């Protein structure tokens, strides 16, 4: 009995140790095909990892710890727009991020785990105050999940009732003090309610200018004309962008404003889970009817965006309850319905996604000096985009969370 208990203890100890990379522990990964995240395909290389970082790409390194030959190896994906704490409550209905029970906290942790093992090693959550403890627990290595950047509480445009320009600036500073990594601004109504502008140009200027002064990026939920106005206000990134004019897209390209459109997953997920959303705040029958009409407009937006020279299109899913762990479906939508080149789709969630977060020197590429965020797919997404569903290996910061092989 004692020996059995001892073995059990050793097994538990080993399981725990695997979660914490020993300082400078060296790991060698063999790969036959690497998409480096910047548009290059590398053949027959070995990736050398020490601690949390990639230290070399060396075809001769050894001994090999993980043999990923026959798979497609690429940097962990970045989702620029998720709502990691949104979940369905005990009654099965959408509670968004509005519940702070122990149940809801566990559901958030489960969302984080599902997202990580689906290949997403970094997400930007736009946003909820409940993101903060989850972000911090993951950052400390206490919970398994993607690296999280959060907007904490978004600035919701309500016309004049939003507040004076000074009050808007104070709101932005308050988010920074609360620990925000980014500022989220709603400058349009929900598209389910028509998508009209909810902030004046002056209000948007104040919000995005204050974010910049605080050293934070400002990402703006915008449809139709709000896209142009937010771009002129110098905001960093446009979320959604449905019904933006070609001129607005060209203006974004000129000003270097990032676009994060959603080709499918978010609406498909709402339609799939209609009964779980219907009747919860913001979700009506009329809204669902509107969403069915908007889906083809979103396909068109992506098609127009990729034809706009110089426009930087990043990958974001707007993952809500029901989507966590299925984020990669958006790649399939973008390629199939939006006409996006599969390599461009991968870059949008790798190096370009990292650039949009201001984190190119840390994530988004397989290169020496960067975080060892490495995933492998069973299949080649350049030939068959559905390979993004078959994530068989996930390493984040040098720690392996999934390794199920072919
Ligand atoms: Zn959202």
Image: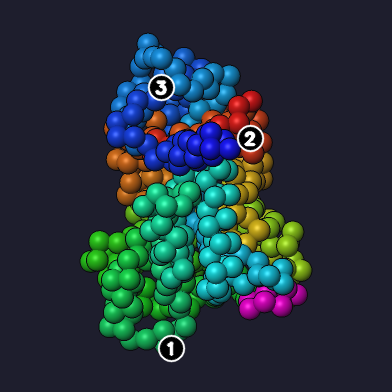
Structural crowding at the residue carrying mark 3, measured as other residues with C-alpha within 10 Å and reported as few (<14), some (14–19) or many (≥20): many
Q: Nearer the viewer, mark 3 or mark 1?
A: 3
Residue that carries the numbered disc 1 in the rendered image: 161
Asked if disc 3 and disc 1 are in contact, CB closer than 8 Å, the reply is no
Q: Is residue 219 in view from this perspective?
A: no
State the separation of the CA atoms marked 2 and 1: 47 Å
Depth check: give the residue in front, 179 or 206. 179
Decide which of 339, 98 is in the foreground and name it.
Answer: 98
Q: Which tag, 2 or 1, sits closer to the chain's start?
A: 1
Q: Residue furthest top?
A: 60
Percent x, y of residue 398? 39, 35
Which mark, residue 390? 2
Q: Are marks 3 and 2 in contact (CB under 8 Å)?
A: no
Query: Which of the pair 44/103 is nearer the observer?
Result: 103
Q: What residue is shown at x 72% (from left), y 72% (from top)?
A: 91
Relative to 77, does residue 261 appear above or below in the rendering? below
Q: Residue furthest left?
A: 213
Quarter residue 24 falls in: top left
Magenta-drawn stretch contains 265: no
Q: Give the structural element (helix, strand or loop) at label 3.
A: strand
**What's drawn in magenta, residue-wise?**
278-285
Residue on which the image places disc 3: 28
**Numbered disc in front, either 3 or 2:** 3
């Amino acid at each position: 009995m004692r020996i059995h208990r001892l073995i059990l203890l050793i097994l538990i100890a080993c399981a725990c140790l695997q979660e914490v990379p020993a300082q400078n522990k060296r790991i060698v990964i063999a790969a036959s095909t690497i998409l480096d995240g910047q548009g290059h395909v590398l053949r027959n290389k070995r990736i050398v990892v020490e601690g949390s970082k990639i230290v070399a790409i060396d075809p001769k390194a050894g001994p090999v710890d993980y043999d990923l030959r026959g798979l497609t190896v690429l940097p962990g994906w970045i989702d620029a727009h998720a709502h990691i704490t949104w979940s369905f409550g005990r009654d099965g209905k959408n509670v968004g991020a509005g519940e702070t029970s122990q149940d809801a906290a566990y559901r958030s942790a489960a969302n984080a785990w599902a997202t990580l093992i689906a290949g997403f090693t970094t997400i930007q959550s736009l946003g909820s105050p409940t993101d903060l403890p989850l972000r911090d627990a993951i950052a400390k290595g206490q919970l398994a999940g993607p690296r999280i950047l959060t907007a904490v509480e978004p600035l919701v445009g309500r016309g004049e009732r939003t507040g004076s320009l000074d009050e808007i600036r104070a709101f932005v500073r308050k988010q920074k003090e609360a620990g925000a990594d980014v500022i989220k601004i709603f400058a349009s109504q929900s598209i389910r309610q028509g998508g009209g502008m909810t902030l004046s140009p002056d209000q948007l200027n104040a919000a995005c200018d204050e974010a910049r002064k605080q050293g934070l990026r400002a990402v703006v939920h915008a449809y139709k004309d709000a896209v142009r106005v937010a771009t002129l206000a110098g905001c960093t990134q446009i979320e959604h962008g449905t019904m933006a004019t070609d001129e607005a897209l060209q203006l974004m390209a000129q000003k270097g404003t990032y676009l994060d459109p959603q080709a499918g997953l978010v609406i498909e997920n709402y339609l799939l889970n209609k009964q779980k959303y219907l009747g919860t705040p913001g979700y009506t029958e009329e809204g669902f009817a509107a969403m069915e009409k908007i889906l083809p407009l979103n396909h068109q937006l992506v098609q127009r965006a990729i034809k706009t020279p110089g426009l930087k299109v990043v990958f974001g899913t707007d993952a809500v309850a029901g989507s966590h762990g299925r984020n990669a479906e958006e790649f399939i939508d973008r390629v199939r319905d939006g006409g996006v080149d599969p390599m461009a789709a991968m870059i949008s969630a790798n190096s370009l996604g990292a650039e949009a977060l201001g984190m190119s020197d840390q994530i988004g590429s397989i290169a020496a000096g960067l975080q060892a965020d490495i995933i492998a797919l069973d299949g080649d997404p350049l030939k068959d985009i559905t390979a993004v569903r078959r994530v068989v290996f996930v390493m984040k910061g040098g720690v392996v969370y999934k390794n199920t092989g072919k």
